Image (cartoon, coloured by chain):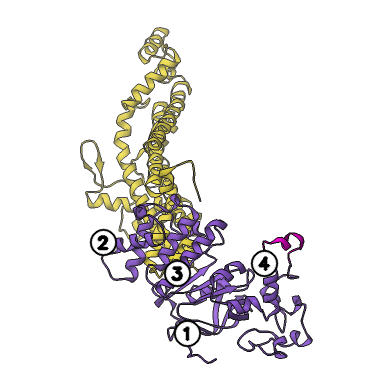
C-alpha cells in the first residue's frame, strides 16, 4: 500500500487570496492547499467564480490589486515563488487562456511572437530560434510555411495550437491551461485536448487543467480538485472522484453533467439548487451547506477541514474511506 | 492592397474637388469681384472690360474649370489689397506656419505619447496624478492666455526668449527657414510650446486611455504569463495596438494647427498664413480667403490620406480585407 512518495513539482499551502474593497476584506481563495506531481495532469473544476482561474493567476503572480495574496506558500521545485513569480513565469510555468481569438497579438506575425518568446528564455541566435519555432509549429500541427502568417488568417482551433506552441516554447515544467477549449467547436475540442495531453506526456510537462466541464476532466486528467467558493471541496484520483464522489457538491456536479444515452431523453437533467454565494455572502460553516441536501447541524457551525486527504465534508467523519 | 490605396487616393481627389467648389463659390459670389476691384464709380465700359479680363461673362462651369486649372498651377488671382498675387502672399507666409505647426506637433505628439504611456503604466502614482491634473490646467486655459503668460515669464521677466516675430530667417529661394539661426530657433520656442500644449494634453489623455484598455487584453496577459519583460510588453505588444487612434488624432491636430494657428500667430505676431487670413477677413480680401480655404482643405486631405495609408502599414487585418474589421 505504501509507495515511495514522489516529490511534488508544485505545492500550494494554505493559500489565501483576499479582495480589498474599501475597508472590507473578502476571501476569494480560502486556505487552499494542493500539490501537482511531475508529469501529471491535475484538473481544477468548479462553477464560475469558484476561484479556479484565480488559482492559476496566483501561481504565476498575475494577481493585481484590489486582490492580493494574504497568506500561504506557493512552492515550485522546492523554492517559494509567491513573491517572485517572474523568475518562473514563461520559463518554467506558462499559461494558455480560454479564447484563442484574442490571445495572440493581432498586429504581429505568429513566427515573430514565437521567436520573441523563445529568445527571451533560451539563449540561442535568431536563425536557430526560427528553426526551433518552425519545428514547434509542425509539432502542434501547423504547416511550417505559415511562420510568417498573421493571427487573423487562422481559425480558432489553429490559433489555440499556436498558443500551445507559445506555451511550450520555453520548455516549461508546468502549463496552466485555463479553459483551453471552452471557446472552441466541440469537434475541435477533443483534438486540442489530445494534442496538449500528448505533447505534455512526451516532455514530462505537468498540466493544471482548469475547466467546468466534467467530461473534459474525465477524458484528460489524472487527478482532480473540486473548488467551491475559493475552498477545496474534494481532491483525489480522477477515477475515484468520478466513480465515488465523497462531497455532496462533487456528487451534484457529476449528476448535473449532461449525458447522451437513451435514459437522458426521458429524465430531466439534475440541477444543484441555488447558486454559489457572492464573496461577501459566504455563510459560516461549510460554504456549501445552504445548497446541500445532506447537511447536518454541524455544517452551519464549523467549516470542515479536508478529511482523509479527500473531501472537506463533515459527513466523512462517520464513515471511513 | 493596391486597390485600397487607389481607392483612398480617389476619395482624396473627390474631397479636394468639393472643397475647390466651395472655395470657388466664395470667390465668385461673396460680393461682386468687379465692384470690389473697381469700386462704385466705374463706368459700364470699364466694368465690361474687367468682366471680360476676369472671364466673369463665361458660363459658370467654364469659370469653375478655369478656377480649378489655375488653382492647380497655384494661381489665385490678385489680392484686393496691394494687388499682389495671392500665390506670392501665401508662399511668403506658408513656411513660417508650417515650421511652427510641425515643431509644435512634434513636441505635442512625442511628449503626449511618452507621458500617456508613463501615466498608464504608473497608474495612480503621485507623479502620474500630478501630470494628469497639471495637464487639465493646460486644456482649460485658453491659448492666448498661455501665450501671454509665457511671454510675461520668459520674455519680460527672465528676458530669455523673444516675445514676437520669427527672428532671423535664412532664404533658401523657395523657402525661408528659422531653423538655421539661433534667433530663429529661440523665436520658435514660445509659440510652438503655446501651440503644442493643447495637442500634448489631448494626445497624452488618449494614449493613456487606449493603453489602459489594451493592457487588459488577453494577448497582453498571455505575454505576461510567457515571462516577457515589461519593456517587450509595453513597446512591442501594447504600443503598436494603440497607434491607430493616436495617429488619427495626431493627424487631425496637425491639420488644425496648420489651419487655425491664428490665435497663437496673433499673440506672437508670427508672420504665418493665419495672420494673413485674419487680415484678409478684416479687409474682405476675397481671393486670399478663398485661396486659404483651398489650402487648408488640401492640407487636411493630404494628412488624412497619409494617416489612412499608415493604418494599412500598422494593421495586417486592414491590408488583407478592409471591409472585415475585427476588433
Label 3 in the same subunit as label 4: no
Of B105 and B261, nearer the camera is: B105
As drawn, the label of residue B225 is 3
Q: CA distance from mark 2 to mark 4?
A: 49 Å
The residue that label 1 is drawn on is A8
Q: Mark 3 touching mark 1, by CB under 8 A?
A: no
Disc number lying in front (1 or 4): 4
Determine the chain carrying the residue at label 2: A
Q: Mark 1 touching mark 4, by CB under 8 A?
A: no
Crowding around mark 4 (Cα neighbors within 10 Å: few <14, some 14 to 19, many 20+) is: some
Q: Is residue A259 magenta?
A: yes
Q: Quadrant of residue A137?
A: bottom left
Q: CA distance from mark 3 to mark 4?
A: 31 Å
Question: The chain coloured purple carries which letter?
Answer: A
Crowding around mark 1 (Cα neighbors within 10 Å: few <14, some 14 to 19, many 20+) is: some
Determine the chain carrying the residue at label 4: A
Range drawn in magenta: A257-269
The residue that label 4 is drawn on is A257
At a point 55% along the width and 59% down the height, the residue shown is: A183
At a point 32% along the width and 27% down the height, the residue shown is: B74
Amino acid at each position: 500500500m505504501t509507495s515511495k512518495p514522489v516529490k511534488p513539482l508544485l505545492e500550494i499551502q494554505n493559500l489565501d487570496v483576499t479582495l480589498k474593497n474599501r475597508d472590507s476584506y473578502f476571501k476569494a481563495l480560502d486556505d487552499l492547499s494542493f500539490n501537482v506531481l511531475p508529469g501529471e495532469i491535475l484538473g481544477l473544476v468548479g462553477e464560475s467564480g469558484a476561484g479556479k482561474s484565480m488559482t492559476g493567476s496566483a501561481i504565476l503572480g498575475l494577481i493585481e490589486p484590489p486582490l492580493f495574496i494574504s497568506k500561504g506558500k506557493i512552492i515550485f521545485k522546492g523554492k517559494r515563488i509567491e513573491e517572485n513569480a517572474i523568475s518562473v513565469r514563461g520559463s518554467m510555468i506558462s499559461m494558455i487562456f480560454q479564447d484563442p481569438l484574442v490571445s495572440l497579438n493581432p498586429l504581429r506575425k505568429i513566427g515573430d511572437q514565437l521567436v520573441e518568446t523563445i529568445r527571451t528564455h533560451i539563449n540561442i541566435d535568431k536563425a536557430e530560434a526560427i528553426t526551433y519555432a518552425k519545428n514547434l509549429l509542425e509539432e502542434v500541427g501547423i504547416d511550417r510555411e505559415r511562420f510568417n502568417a498573421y493571427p487573423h488568417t487562422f481559425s480558432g482551433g489553429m490559433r489555440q495550437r499556436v498558443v500551445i506552441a507559445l506555451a511550450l516554447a520555453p520548455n516549461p515544467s508546468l502549463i496552466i491551461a485555463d479553459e483551453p477549449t471552452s471557446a472552441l467547436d466541440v469537434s475541435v475540442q477533443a483534438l486540442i485536448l489530445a494534442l496538449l495531453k500528448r505533447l505534455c506526456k512526451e516532455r514530462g510537462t505537468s498540466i493544471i487543467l482548469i475547466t467546468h466541464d466534467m467530461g473534459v476532466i474525465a477524458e484528460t486528467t489524472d487527478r482532480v480538485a473540486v473548488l467551491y467558493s475559493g475552498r477545496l471541496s474534494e481532491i483525489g484520483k480522477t477515477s475515484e472522484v468520478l466513480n465515488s464522489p465523497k462531497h455532496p457538491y462533487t456528487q451534484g456536479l457529476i449528476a448535473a453533467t449532461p449525458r447522451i444515452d437513451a435514459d437522458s431523453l426521458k429524465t430531466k437533467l439534475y440541477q444543484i439548487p441555488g447558486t454559489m454565494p457572492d464573496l461577501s455572502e459566504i455563510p459560516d460553516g461549510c460554504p456549501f451547506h445552504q445548497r446541500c441536501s445532506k447537511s447536518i447541524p454541524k455544517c452551519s457551525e464549523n467549516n470542515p477541514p479536508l478529511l482523509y486527504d479527500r473531501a472537506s465534508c463533515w459527513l466523512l467523519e462517520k464513515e471511513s474511506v | 492592397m493596391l486597390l485600397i490605396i487607389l481607392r483612398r487616393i480617389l476619395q482624396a481627389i473627390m474631397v479636394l474637388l468639393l472643397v475647390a467648389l466651395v472655395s470657388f463659390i466664395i470667390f465668385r459670389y461673396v460680393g461682386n469681384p468687379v465692384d470690389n476691384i473697381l469700386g462704385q464709380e466705374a463706368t459700364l465700359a470699364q466694368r465690361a472690360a474687367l468682366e471680360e479680363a476676369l472671364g466673369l461673362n463665361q458660363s459658370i462651369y467654364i469659370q469653375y474649370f478655369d478656377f480649378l486649372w489655375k488653382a492647380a498651377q497655384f494661381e489665385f488671382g490678385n489680392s484686393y489689397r496691394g494687388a499682389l498675387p495671392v500665390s506670392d502672399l501665401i508662399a511668403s507666409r506658408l513656411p513660417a506656419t508650417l515650421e511652427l505647426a510641425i515643431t509644435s506637433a512634434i513636441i505635442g505628439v512625442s511628449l503626449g505619447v511618452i507621458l500617456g504611456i508613463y501615466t498608464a503604466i504608473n497608474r495612480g502614482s503621485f507623479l502620474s496624478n500630478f501630470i494628469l491634473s497639471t495637464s487639465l490646467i493646460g486644456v482649460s486655459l485658453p491659448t492666448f492666455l498661455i501665450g501671454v503668460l509665457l511671454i510675461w515669464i520668459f520674455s519680460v521677466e527672465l528676458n530669455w526668449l523673444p516675445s514676437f516675430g520669427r527672428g532671423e530667417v535664412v532664404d533658401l529661394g523657395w523657402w525661408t527657414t528659422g531653423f538655421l539661426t539661433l534667433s530663429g530657433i529661440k523665436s520658435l520656442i514660445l509659440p510652438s510650446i503655446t501651440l503644442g500644449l493643447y495637442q500634448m494634453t489631448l494626445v497624452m489623455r488618449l494614449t493613456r486611455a487606449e493603453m489602459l484598455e489594451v493592457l487588459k487584453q488577453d494577448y497582453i496577459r498571455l505575454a505576461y504569463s510567457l515571462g516577457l519583460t515589461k519593456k517587450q510588453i509595453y513597446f512591442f505588444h501594447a504600443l503598436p495596438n494603440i497607434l491607430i487612434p493616436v495617429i488619427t488624432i495626431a493627424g487631425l491636430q496637425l491639420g488644425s494647427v496648420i489651419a487655425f494657428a491664428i490665435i497663437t500667430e496673433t499673440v506672437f505676431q508670427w508672420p504665418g498664413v493665419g495672420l494673413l487670413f485674419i487680415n484678409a477677413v478684416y479687409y474682405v480680401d476675397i481671393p486670399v480667403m478663398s485661396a486659404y480655404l483651398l489650402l487648408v482643405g488640401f492640407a487636411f486631405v493630404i494628412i488624412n490620406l497619409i494617416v489612412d495609408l499608415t493604418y494599412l502599414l500598422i494593421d495586417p487585418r486592414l491590408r488583407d480585407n478592409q471591409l472585415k474589421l475585427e476588433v
